[in-house]
Amino acid sequence: MLKTLWTTVRQGKIELLESEELPEGVRVLVTVLPDDETEFWQTASQPSLDAVWDNTEDDVYAELL
């Protein structure tokens, strides 16, 4: 399972911003986002997300509920 977790670094250690149960020894991949680029990457993905989630083709599924 892939999951994105927001973290910060304090005194050389990575700290989760939200509580999350991670099994001991779990492997993680860390991507460092420079502070000046964080907002760019968050907003750069918004048009793609909008295209996937905000479309009329999926309205048929709402009718089935």
Image (cartoon, grey):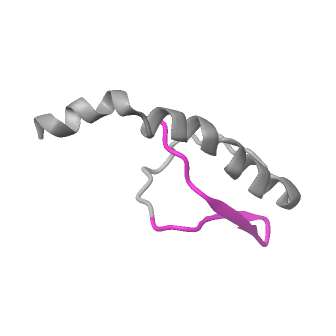
Write down the region rendered in magenta. 1-19
Residue 14 visible? The answer is no
In the rendered image, the residue lying farthest to the top is 57
* Percent coordinates x, y for residue 19 in the rendering: 46, 67
* Percent coordinates x, y for residue 20 in the rendering: 44, 61
Position of residue 36 relative to residue 65, above or below, is below
Magenta region includes residue 2: yes
Position of residue 19 relative to residue 40, above or below, is below
Asked if residue 5 lies left or right of residue 24, the reply is right
Asked if residue 30 lies left or right of residue 65, the reply is right
Which residue is at a point 49% across and 43% down the rendered structure image?
Answer: 3
* Percent coordinates x, y for residue 14 in the rendering: 68, 61
Asked if residue 49 lies left or right of residue 11, the reply is left
Position of residue 48 relative to residue 12, above or below, is above
Position of the N terminus by quadrant:
top left
Magenta region includes residue 12: yes
Residue 27 visible? The answer is yes
Position of residue 42 relative to residue 45, above or below, is below
